[in-house]
Amino acid sequence: MLPIMAVDLEIIVNDTHDSNKQELRLWLRLLSTTKLISQEVRRRLRSEFGATLPQFDLLAQLYREPEGLRLGELSKRTMVTNGNITGLIERLEADGFVRRETPDDDRRVTVARLTDEGKAIFSRMAEAHESWLRDLMADVDPATIRTILAEMELLKNSAKRHLS
Amino acid sequence: MLPIMAVDLEIIVNDTHDSNKQELRLWLRLLSTTKLISQEVRRRLRSEFGATLPQFDLLAQLYREPEGLRLGELSKRTMVTNGNITGLIERLEADGFVRRETPDDDRRVTVARLTDEGKAIFSRMAEAHESWLRDLMADVDPATIRTILAEMELLKNSAKRHLS
DNA sequence: TATTGTTATACTCTATAACTATA
DNA sequence: TATAGTTATAGAGTATAACAATA
């Protein structure tokens, strides 16, 4: 059973009403919202496709690159370390969704690409995924969704800059 | 090394320019933003405090409940299953941050509460946490942060309702 | 019988570092 | 020497289900 009555972690910092801790509050709300949704999405990915979220993420990157991607590039895009990409790819390869190849011009490189089966599966996964999210966000009007979308980009870019 | 040049998963669904897949796009952006920030936060929690994010979350819940919380309640608030709460608490108890007690009026129940050491540690963790987030969100103006905060609540409530 | 936690299990993810092959 | 991946390792998180103690 999913414990969906979760109380917000953010309330701790909400106690001081004059707080200038908006950043922390936003982060905690972001975290709990994402956790709430991602538990549901992961549960459905697993039960309907036997897949995990990192696997979905990786497949999605490959789906839009018919020529495939080097593992190093995949690592950057999925924010998964090089060493762990190997394990992820191996599981997906064992399932028959991904194939690895080494180009002749540089034998150090490994390029991963989707198999036909991988493309077919991912296509179904993406479609299901989309309908789950439409459902979960049904009470938020489209204009607000677009607004948050734009604002999240600002936030993400700020975080990126302050990591570098 | 952290791969911070992550490209958005969302671009897949951005290909169809007339898309009505705003919900999925928002979800993917939410996910990648949260992942970006949480990798950094987890890294610092670990290096500076030897703690994980789920541990931080659990400690935070206890911090605001001087009388402690039943494990079942902790499970709901942290969105961690009962069985896994046991393991989390055991690690925190071994560190000396948490104590478990069984009330006499109902011997089935276990109440967890922070030790004095746990309170002291969490207080430092929360303060550091706050400054990390202030830093990461430095480029987003306070008004926008408050706006997103409010909008995230709408989103979270929508998700909650459509899970029940 | 229902509730509260615990135990057991299996798998995946995460982070770090050492290592191999190739350039 | 530098780069691209792989291997190894250790520790946690996650989900499920069976189980024990108590009500």
Image (cartoon, coloured by chain):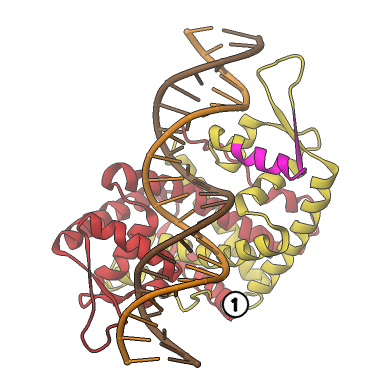
Chain colours: A yellow, B red, C brown, D orange
- Answer above or below: position of B17 versus B82: above
Disc 1 is placed on an element classified as loop
Q: Residue at x 19, y 63 (%)?
A: B119
Q: Nearer the viewer, residue B107 or A16?
A: B107
Please give left or right for residue B124 compared with residue A116 in the image. left
Q: Residue at x 58, y 74 (%)?
A: B159
User: Relative to residue B161, is residue A34 depicted above or below?
Assistant: above
The amino acid type found where label 1 is placed reads Leu
Which percent across, then down, holds residue B127? 25, 55
Residue B4, compared with residue B72, is above or below; it is above
Does the segment drawn in magenta span residue B54?
no
Instruction: Decide: few, some or many residues near mark 1? Use Cα within 10 Å; few <14, some 14-19, many ≥20.
Output: some
Position of residue A81 measured from the top left corner of the image (x, y, whole percent): 53, 36
In terms of depth relative to the viewer, which is nearer, D3 or A18?
A: D3
- Left or right: where D4 falls relative to D12: right
| Residue A50 in picture, x, y percent from top left | 69, 57
The magenta stretch is: A87-100
If the image is split into quadrants, where does the C terminus of chain A sit? top left
Q: Taking D2 as reference, is B72 left or right?
A: left
Residue A20 appears in the rendering? no
Q: Give residue B117's quadrant in the image.
A: bottom left
Would residue A72 be visible to someone looking at this image?
yes
Residue on which disc 1 sits: B163
Count of picture labels: 1
x, y percent for residue B5: 56, 36
Quarter of the figure with residue A47: bottom right
Letter of the chain that mark 1 sits on in the rendering: B
